[in-house]
Amino acid sequence: MACMQLLLLLCLLVSLCNCYRMFGRFSRIPPEPQSDSAVQDQWFEQKLDHFRGADTRVWKQRFYVNDSFTHSDGPVFLMIGGEGSANPAWMTHGTWITFAEKMGALCLLLEHRFYGKSHPTKDLSVDNLRYLSSRQALADLAHFQTVMTEKLGLGKRKWIVFGGSYPGCLAAWYRLKFPHLAHAAVASSAPVQAKLNFSEYLDVVQSSLARNDSDCPNKFKVASATLIQLLNFVENYEKITSDFRLCQPLEINTKMDRAFFLDTIAEYIMDVVQYNNDNREFEGVKTTNITIQVVCGIMANESWGSPYDRYVEVIRTILKATGEKCIEASYKKYVEEMRSSCWEGPAASGGRQWMYQTCTEFGYFQSSDSSSQPFSGFPLSYHVQQCTDIYGNEFNLAMITGAIQQTVENYGGLNIESSRIVFPNGLIDPWHALGINTSLGTDIVAIPMQDAAHCADMYPARPEEPFVLPAVRKLVYELLTKWLQL
Ligand SMILES: *[C@@H]1O[C@H](CO)[C@@H](O)[C@H](O)[C@H]1NC(C)=O
Ligand SMILES: *[C@@H]1O[C@H](CO)[C@@H](O)[C@H](O)[C@H]1NC(C)=O
Ligand SMILES: *[C@@H]1O[C@H](CO)[C@@H](O)[C@H](O)[C@H]1NC(C)=O
Ligand SMILES: *[C@@H]1O[C@H](CO)[C@@H](O)[C@H](O)[C@H]1NC(C)=O
Ligand SMILES: *[C@@H]1O[C@H](CO)[C@@H](O)[C@H](O)[C@H]1NC(C)=O
Ligand SMILES: *[C@@H]1O[C@H](CO)[C@@H](O)[C@H](O)[C@H]1NC(C)=O
């Protein structure tokens, strides 16, 4: 009931300002899938708590199947869902589908608990979010595999798991923790090293921005320094509001308000780098023609005015491409949305859940604390404070630090001790800094991908893609073929 009332209120707010978006803040979350897909939702009865045998509660987890290529001698491919709705577009597109066609694989995709339509609990209260963790997610996969093997008579077939980004970690960790179930894993752009202060993210943003124009990062640095100067005087807020097309007049009362605004603007540039030239259109993404080259081209073009004015032009160009009318930059509003624990809430398609996972397992906080990067104003303390502001006082620095340590102890971080895992990592992608970029023996294989962005190897091939990708796909295919013979 409380949820319904809040929902009405939120709908009202959304329709009044008519600019609600799922971008920027939650940009690590995949886009909402198109609803016209022919792929059917299927449902699996899943346990709520895998770590307490006496707990018999169950819920329905969503999954997808593509059995067009399946052959009784072929493997089973399991794509692992991540921090957003499972997108049925993956059931007909992407590198793994081309592999499945050649290998006679049965393709399955299991949505991650607490995301999309996979709702284990009646709401997203902090109390219920205790059942949201990578460990529960891995146990979901194990139970799913065991039951489906029995139900579909797949006893003799080898399972290969796939995932990109956080699900890339899950793919590697599933092979690590359930070697009797997973025969091999393809872990694309997997940040397997949990880390509180992920300041390296922006270090890579800096070096990636420099790849075609070595002065590009410096221009961003000058522009963001000017922006910070402007923020010192309230008289400038009207100008800043209109320059960056903010949805509401800029209001800065606290350090968090200021950091949130600066982080929000910088995240547009971070996203351009992270997804540079990735072929994500089949997923319904619109930003693909705004590349590092486009933004650095604007930053180098004096006809747009000062570096600050060029930065404004860059942001406007991105907004035009995504169709966003304005930028939400109010920390107060963000926290209100993130605190909503209804399934119908504004951050419930992934923002609230993923932030919870970063606060309780991974950190990954992209602080502006490093001196070798162009932005400033969103230090580590700002990210940590968000955990407290959204989930409550016990989510403080000491708790978060301990939780991240536990994750590293559990999975081993970069020292993962396993076999038959391949780790493709795009070197433009800031996440590669927490990934495995050196092979550990002959069957933990790192594939550093020159010029490629986040999860680039997973997307459908196209002529304008980075030069390395055809060879990467071929290498992964050959590794899987070899491993399947073992
Ligand atoms: C499986 O994927 C192929 C390739 O996109 C597609 O043609 C086929 O219709 C899909 N089959 C099912 C059952 O979805
Ligand atoms: C940009 O840099 C990349 C990597 O250094 C290079 O492959 C590409 O050709 C460059 N493009 C232009 C237009 O300079
Ligand atoms: C990106 O694509 C949109 C729509 O197709 C087009 O209007 C815009 O000019 C393009 N921008 C760049 C920088 O290529
Ligand atoms: C700089 O921007 C102006 C205005 O959009 C454009 O006409 C011009 O071609 C650009 N110059 C370069 C070198 O890209
Ligand atoms: C985060 O890491 C950077 C780079 O190592 C360091 O300079 C900075 O002091 C760290 N921040 C905190 C709060 O420890
Ligand atoms: C690979 O990882 C090591 C250790 O983290 C790091 O020093 C090195 O710079 C990385 N190489 C690349 C190409 O990212």
Image: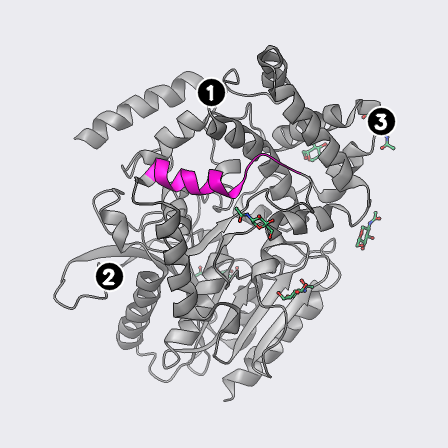
Let me know if residue 6 appears in the view.
Answer: yes
- In the depicted view, which residue is nearer to us: 381 or 127? 381
Residue 331 vertical position relative to residue 41 in the rendered view, above or below: above
* The magenta segment: 375-390
What kind of secondary structure does the magenta stretch mostly adopt? helix
Q: Quadrant of residue 384?
A: top left
Let me know if residue 111 appears in the view.
Answer: no
Q: CA distance from mark 3 to mark 2?
A: 58 Å
Which residue is tagged 2? 46
Q: Secondary structure at mark 3?
A: helix
Numbered marks: total: 3
Which residue is tagged 3? 302
Residue 37 vertical position relative to residue 224 in the rendered view, above or below: below
Residue 467 position within the rendered picture, expressed as x and y whole percent measured from the top left: 75, 61
Q: CA distance from mark 2 to mark 1?
A: 46 Å
- Asked if disc 3 and disc 2 are in contact, CB closer than 8 Å, the reply is no
Which residue is tagged 1? 253
- In the depicted view, which residue is nearer to us: 301 or 91? 301
Q: Residues within 10 Å of mark 2 (few under 14, many from 20)?
A: many
